[in-house]
Image (cartoon, rainbow, N blue to C red):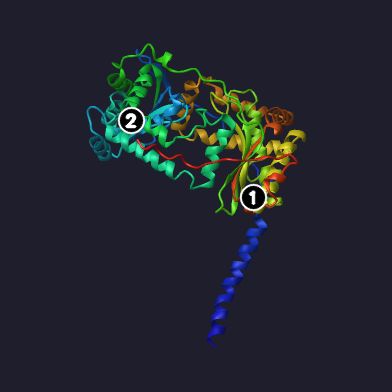
Amino acid sequence: PRKYWILLLVLPFMWLLFNAVTVTAQSARHYTDLEFLPAPEIVLPPFDRFELENGMVVYLMQDRELPLVSGTALIRTGDRFEPGNQAGLGQILGQVLRTGGTKLHSPDELNELLERRAASVETGVDTTSASASFNALSQDLDEVFGLFAEVLRIPAFAPVQIELAKRQQAGAIARRNDSPSTIASREFPKLIYGENSPYARTIEYETLSNISPSDVVQFYQRYFHPNNMILGIVGDFETAEMRSLIEQKFGDWKRDTTVGQNIPALSPTSQAKQKGIFFVERSQLTQSTIQIGHLGGELNSPDYPALSVLNGVMNGFGGRLFNQVRSREGLAYSVYGVWSPRFDYPGMFIAGGQTRSEATVPFIQSVFREIERIRMEPITAEELKYAQDTTLNSFIFNFADPSQTLSRLMRYEYYGYPEDFIFQYRRGVEETTIEDVQRGAQKYLNPDQLVTLVVGNATEINPPLSSLTPDTTVTSIDISIPEPSRS
């Protein structure tokens, strides 16, 4: 019959498939059996660093692999310097610096000129800096670099574009509670830094309404000066010609002798909430998003290499949190615990993940146990070696191409780090011992200061959060969005 003929045809393929699966299963190796090659040495490509007479610092690094040139300017500012009642000012400036056109080209003309050359000029302002960048074919460098200089030096800040940017920010406010992970990432820093801290404050309708076009212009005029800027260019160019082009486009830009006075001193940062359980109710959820942590430190800590190794012990497919919380206990879809420092202000130690609602309390307890275990029990020699290897091998990818290396050099100068910080860090990781990791864990992981935030459905969290400790008080966080004023 026909069905038997079909079976006879299919059976050989099934046999082959079975054998292929068997061979694959037999050849699969556990992650602990993997062997890492020694991380290659980091070799800095040749580069030039010089200053224009007006104080602009310039880095040039040739890369002739492709006929492309790219560059970035870092400006010493950031939205941490915007007034608290004008939260959003920095982001609007960063957007309209590019979208608002220049005094020589309207926004549409600027877009058309760049699109015609398959080039780009982008700008932005983040917490600790502002930036402007360009990308161009080598043959179009003169024209595109000229437009890049216009954007930096003579932006038009078209009022219609400022209003558009404000409307877009308002739209983002309206959608900001759509994702539990977004809620957690926004609300947790408020618990650590304080809701009015420049590292945690939230853009509101009211703060947007306080921003006028003149405020945007004044913020720009306060910080955008050549002696407050680092410019880095990498790509296919002749160094002498590139220096001449930079002099031509930026050499006559006057320095501002008062710019240093315009940069406010950074206020000391302290932890706002000491310990505690905080909860955001989202009754539609079937799972909880959890963040646990406290105030952290800076990259220039002498213990930073050891803390990086500690991160390697705790995180990833071979890390303790993944192995224990996810694999053995089955309590998490994702789990992490990271010492996350910043260049010039304290970062955070932050652990967390996502789990089903009924596993929320066991998940938190398990993460706390792992934090305590790494503080009290020395890691094994195998864990140390694995963490060092993974840390060093992943670190190498930060220098995969010259543009990444140049970006690092610029950042180190921007924040006042030594040029050889790259090599100091690598040596520190290589020299980290088991004792260093435990000492770092005991010094920098403080269970008594851990703040816990849960975004989830209270009726589905069983046992309840109040069962975590005998004296647990759960504080609810209101994330309702303040309505815009009638004006």
The picture places residue 167, in percent across and down from the top left corner, at 35, 39
Which amino acid, by three-letter code, is at mark 2? Leu
Name the residue nearer the viewer: 230 or 459: 459
Say which quarter of the image contains residue 95: top left
Residue 212 appears left or right of 453: left
Would you say 407 lies left or right of 106 here? right
User: Upstream in the sequence, badge 2 or badge 1?
Assistant: 2
Residue 33, visible in the rendered structure: no
- Residue at 59% over, 71% down: 14
Q: Secondary structure at mark 2?
A: helix
Pick out the residue farthest to the top.
257
Query: Residue type at mark 1?
Result: Ala
Q: Which image quadrant: the N terminus?
A: bottom right
Name the residue located 36 percent from the left edge and 21 percent from the top edge. Answer: 224
Residue on which disc 2 sits? 97
> What crowding class fits label 2: few (fewer than 14 Cα within 10 Å), some (14-19), or many (20 or more)?
many
